[in-house]
Image (cartoon, rainbow, N blue to C red):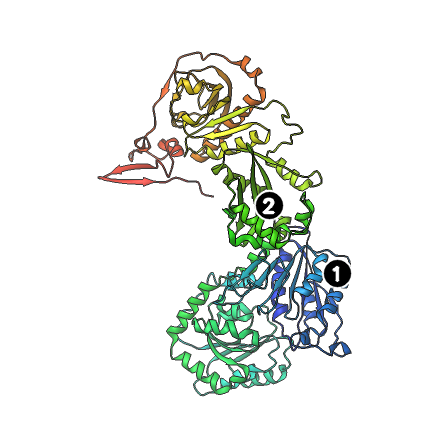
Amino acid sequence: MIRKQNLVVIFRTDASRQIGSGHVMRCLTLAEALRDAGGTIVFITRNHLGNLNDYIKSKGFNVHSLPDRNESNMQQGLSGYEKWLGVKQDHDAKDTIQALSGIHPDWLIVDHYALDNNWEEELRPYTKNIMAIDDLANRCHDCDVLLDQNFFHDQDRYNQLLSPATIKLLGPQYALLHNDFAEIRKSFRHNSNEINRVFIFFGGTDPDNLTTMALKAMTHPNLQNMSLNVVIGLANPHQQIVKEQVQENPNAKLHIQVENIAELMVKADISFGAGGTTTWERMAVGLPSIVVTTAENQVAFIKDLDQADYLKWLGNTDQVNVQSLQRALLDAIQKPHLLLEQSKKNQELIDGLGNQLIAKLLTVGPEIETLTVRRADSSDCLLYWHWVNDPVVRESAFNQEHIKWEDHQSWFDQLLNNSDTILLLIECDFGPIGQVRFNRSGSHHTIDYSIGRQFRRFGLNKAVLSKAIDYFRREQLFILISYVKKTNPTSRKVFEQLGFHEILSPSGGEVFSITILSDRTTWMNPWISKLLADWAMAGHRISWVHEPSKVSGGDFCFMLSCGDIVSSDILNRNKNNLVVHGSALPKGKGWSPLSWQIIEGAESIVITLFEAADNVDSGMIYLQKKIKFQGHELVDELRQQQAEATMRLCKQFVEQYPSILDQSRKQNGESTFYSKRTPSDSKLDPNKTIAEQFNLLRIVDNKSYPAYFDLNGTRYILKVEKET
């Protein structure tokens, strides 16, 4: 279970006979998931006729009720969805601000068709982040996250209504469904070829009493014997009529404001329903549906679902009658195979995990493993402009003035076309997270970065910078320097955690010219990149090459995981040439010493740092370090320990130079040599047990030289990995 303590979330939403219950119900679903994640939740609702305040409280949530203005003169001049709100939205904003009464929530989640960017801009100073839940795409929003869980062919309909920095959660995969829908679908599939059970639910209020119409439709002679589960909400104004009709049908059962609606749905073969939130509930469990749209905002996506054969749409409330409902059901009964196909297709579209996915985003943010890096391009200009003018970014910048759009365009174009600048965009599954910029100045690069507002509270700064620096290192071989204001402790701390050191003078101590020579594709390169960053941030001049001829002159050349023989003239370019080898020299000279020793049953090995000489692995020893193993490590774990020990020895040499030279000693004892491993060295004997050959399995590389055995003229490849 996700746990993020002290998260405070405020929901601003309403229910009424006019609005219906859908907005509140889907907010309740998300609220319960956020509460399970450790959040403190409060609802702010207006006290309309038909509200669900008592129901919200019964779920264990606090409710701050705004006064109902329907009877006041404030109703005058209202139009459209404002009539649902009961007041002008600027007045609602003032009421909401007053209701917050000093609380500064982590998230303010607004779900109301009458509220737009004007309301959100008024509330912006009173919350850290804003999430808007919408279905209409008919107005602008000033929000950090927008959720529209509906199905549309047009995925660009919000592009002109939102900042490009807004996270857009679009589509039924984000539908706010209770966890029981995801659970029940794991073990349930509709597979009946007969249609005998009908589920009827037209929403919490059903103001047009479609429930009664559906019950009348079931009086058809060919439908009378069907089993019916009928659901209505507490706010349904036609409860008494529905109760009387259900009592007249011995095969019908009435449920009011049910908590187990998923269980009722999976017991049915087909359903009559409205086009609201329950659409996604029915689809999640694979329940085929005959749908009547009860509000204008339902029409577009229900029409798209109908055209894509996810359901059967009959039209709006005023376009259906008892006879049309009967015809639709009778037609479906004649084609059970089509209903089975529809059921399967529905469940492929919706997995029921959207609620959990959004709760995780709001509480702990994206997983670091999902972060990706790419070069920015011209299409990112507007996004960067929004980021660069974020008040927090401007406050932390050396130039704090607002950046004009025209100036930004010119600046951005120059950056993209400047070979001395690398502009990177960091993204996750939910969209862009932040930007990192490297600017070359002489022999070094400076670093500038920013994180999108909605991602700042998740501690992603270090991960974003690490990803960007890793990308940068693969392309550039220059010193990295970050200029951070003294008044920006957050960024200073992040750079310190990444191994950056503050340099108070050009030297900050003695500065060395350091080169690392490694094979281009060696497994050790990720650790080498981190070592180079540490040295670069300490002020040393560094370079990283993969060919001996490109070694530059300087103080030190470290040859790490380098398979080339380096000639004397190249060794003469640096004062010291250091090699790190995985054995207690002079024993174990040659190739792959770690692998050979593990095969021999070694429980520990010695890592040796020594001076390169004309004869391979024969130079003066400076440092040695023993690493121990548990006996269960596979090749990646063995390599990690070897690499970390190697990096520590390299750092120790530089830190203790030149006194470290006085510790040098000659190699003493008998020399032994390991040969270069070939694919044939990974061959297993099928007549021996796994236990007998386990050490060989520990050191095989599944990709480059996997284990294999030959049997009866056929070769078999084995891959070994630990269960996680």
Mark 1 / mark 2, whichever is N-terminal: 1
Position in image of residue 552 (x %, y %): 47, 25
Image location (x, y in percent) of residue 297: 57, 74
In the image, residue 108 sits, relative to residue 225, either above or below, namely above
Q: Amino acid at mark 2?
A: Leu
**Residue 634 visible to the viewer:** no
Q: Which residue is mark 1?
A: 100
Q: Secondary structure at mark 1?
A: helix
Location of mark 2 (residue): 460
| Element type at mark 2 | loop
Instruction: Tell whether label 2 touches label 1 (CB within 8 Å).
Output: no
Point out residue 91 in the picture as x, y percentages from the top left corner: 74, 69
User: Does residue 576 sit above or below 387 in this rendering?
Assistant: above
Q: Is residue 138 visible?
A: yes
| Neighbour tally class for label 1: few under 14, some 14-19, many 20 plus, Cα within 10 Å | some
Task: Decide if residue 664 is on the left or right side of residue 386.
Answer: left
* Distance CA(mark 1)–CA(mark 2): 29 Å
